[in-house]
Amino acid sequence: MTPVIALTRFRVAGYVASHRALQPLLALLALLAILYAGAVPAGQEIAATADSAAMLVPVLAWAARGLLDTEPDEQRAVALSALGGREPVSGLLAAFASLLVLAAIAEAALLTRLAGSPTLGVLLTGVWLHLLSVAAGLVLGALTSRPILRSPAVSTMALIFGYLWMLALSFAGARWLTVPVMAWMRDAHHGVLLEQPLLLTAQSLLWPAIGLAAYTWLRRTRP
């Protein structure tokens, strides 16, 4: 795994050194400024956490796509010839690491805007929901990255409509047909989010798992 970790670090370093890393960060800061223009009232901590995680998905997808697009095609081909089937893993790990940083910033911003003192339950719920958001954003970004969709215009449209389709299906109650981001918010605002956490986790990770399998297969045919 040492070559994979080395390539992962190289990709993260290249992404940070490029201007691509600033774009989703600025979008995240703008989103957080809107979400937390006022303090979160006591009793609304879980609802605010769910809103943050759901709205963060397109920003995270943009960041993942940007990282995977940073590397030139020629360099990716060299890495593919050196690592073979392990090459896509390094890109996914690098994207996952970058998304964790953005999710941590969002969670920290939320905690600073709580009117009351956050409980351990709030902290764990925030980590849980933002990890689910990271998984959804990672897969959406990977499936719309340049190795899969060559056209930047098509890639951007696919990312936007992919998120909108996610919202539409989850709003319609089709929890098993998409990542149920609307269900996160609806259940949180009705106080039932934590009644079946394992079921909601399974629903939220099903399609990211399928998406990762699809991305891995497509990368084998589109180096």
Image: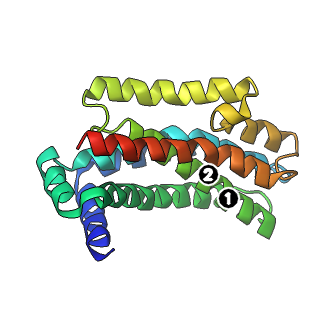
On screen, residue 9 versus residue 113, left or right, reads: left
Q: Could you say whether the residue bearing mark 2 is in a helix, strand or loop? A: helix
Is residue 27 in sight in this rendering? no
The Cα–Cα distance between marks 2 and 1, rounded to whole angstroms, is 6 Å
Q: Residue furthest bottom?
A: 2
Q: Position of residue 52 (x, y in %)?
A: 63, 46
Name the spot of residue 108 as percent of width and height, x first: 59, 61
Residue 109, quarter of the rendered image = bottom right
Instruction: Name the residue type under label 2.
Output: Leu
Residue highlighted by disc 1: 128
Q: Residue at x 61, y 54 (%)?
A: 130
Tag 1: Cα neighbours inside 10 Å, few (<14), some, or many (≥20)? some
Seen from the viewer's position, the closer of residues 163 and 205 is: 205
Label 1 secondary element? helix
The reply to whether residue 10 is in sight is: yes
Quarter of the image for the N terminus: give it.
bottom left
Q: Position of residue 101 (x, y in %)?
A: 47, 61
Q: In the rendering, at what x and y percent does residue 201 appear? A: 71, 51
**Is residue 55 positioned above or below 100 on the image?**
above
Q: Quadrant of residue 56?
A: top right
Find residue 132 and name its label.
2
Amino acid on which disc 1 is placed: Trp
- Colour pattern: rainbow
Q: Toward the viewer: 143 or 168?
A: 143
